[in-house]
Amino acid sequence: VRHFVTQLNLFLFLSCKYLRQGRKFLVRKLTGRCELQRICYNNKSGAHRTLKIESSLKFSKSELLQSAVIVHPDSVEKTIDDIMTLKKIDPDINPQLGISLQASLLQIVGYHKLMAEVEKLRREPYDCNNPEHEEMLVKLWKALRPESPLTGRISKQWMEIGFQGSDPKTDFRGMGLLGLHSLLYFAEHDQAAALQVLHDSLQPKHSKMSKAEWDKKSFEKAIGYSFAIVGINITDLAYTLLVNGALKTHLYNVAPEIPNMVHFQQTFSYLMQEFHRFWTEEDPCDIMEFNRVRNKFYKRILTQLKDPDMVLCPHFTASDLHLITL
Ligand SMILES: *[C@@H]1O[C@H](CO)[C@@H](O)[C@H](O)[C@H]1NC(C)=O
Ligand SMILES: *[C@@H]1O[C@H](CO)[C@@H](O)[C@H](O)[C@H]1NC(C)=O
């Protein structure tokens, strides 16, 4: 029986493969267009189109098409020329095709490049002998506590912004410099939001309680959560979404061409704010529920990202901005 099942599987696999190729061949004969052309003509730009192009290239028979998804961004133009030649598409008759294909391919190879950059930062440990690292840490303090100067590099004050002890260095172990970069981006570029989240995270949970009730609860239980620690953990969440490919829909929809580090950090800033909102809605008893709330939040974001129209946070370019004010 097992033998039969194996054979059946093989048969089904081959049938699917040949059916797919046969169908592609037939459609090409009928429409005079190859699959890439049909995708480019029938789908609007962004994740709809780029995700289809990506899978069409990956599952192609041609080695040129298969390897197109991993070329260096500088070689994209040449790769497009080669594809047009291979598919016998005249660029003068189909000028839009090259443009669409190029934008999509830049997104595809750019996503891989971004993954490598993010991974490099994640692997770089925080080093207190590196003046650049130290400077970033001090900047983080200044952005989050503008009115309260730091009394020393090693200080209990760090706990005011949600580090675990008097030296933040140890808290960066899990995510390396990526955690610091993300927190600093959020604090500096979305400062009002970051200050609000920090402020709320420091609030006792049950503010309507009477003083007597309040004293009964332990301090630990009453507090919201540790801003910096949760920020480093949400960096991990953003990183996971990037590495498992879930962020493709969002990034292909917001980055016109190559998605870069700023796109990633904007995504992080959005996730921080959304997680904060979610945490508040879930109304957990204490920080012990972090695991549960985080998992639920992660699943929700994953589901949202399955929709190819999904944009986690809109990114406005200068030209968009004047349209909005009109
Ligand atoms: C995208 O293009 C493909 C290939 O032509 C087509 O089957 C699909 O329906 C199009 N999708 C949308 C959303 O238009
Ligand atoms: C973030 O939290 C999750 C769940 O509690 C945990 O599995 C993960 O290791 C944490 N990541 C970091 C960088 O601490």
Image (cartoon, rainbow, N blue to C red):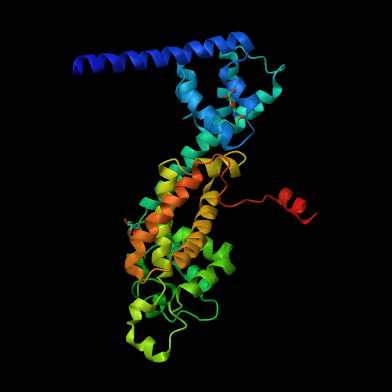
Q: Is residue 86 above or below residue 237?
A: above
Taking the image as shown, residue 309 lies to the left or right of residue 242, namely right
In which quadrant is the C terminus drawn? bottom right
**Residue at 56% across, 28% down:** 76
Q: Is residue 30 above or below residue 59?
A: above
The answer to whether residue 155 is seen in the rendering is no
Asked where in the image residue 190 lies, by quadrant, the reply is bottom right
Q: Position of residue 189 (x, y in %)?
A: 58, 62
Q: Specify the quarter for ligand 1.
A: top right
Judged from this view, the residue extending furthest toward the bottom is 212
Q: Position of residue 290 (x, y in %)?
A: 36, 64
**Residue at 42% across, 58% down:** 234
Q: Is residue 170 above or below residue 88?
A: below
Q: Position of residue 194 (x, y in %)?
A: 53, 67
Which of the pair 40/290 is nearer the observer?
290
Taking the image as shown, residue 153 lies to the left or right of residue 147, namely left
The total number of labels drawn is 0
Q: Position of residue 253 (x, y in %)?
A: 59, 42
In which quadrant is the N terminus drawn? top left
**Residue at 50% across, 44% down:** 305
**Residue at 53% across, 66% down:** 187
The answer to whether residue 253 is seen in the rendering is yes
Judged from this view, the residue extending furthest toward the right is 326
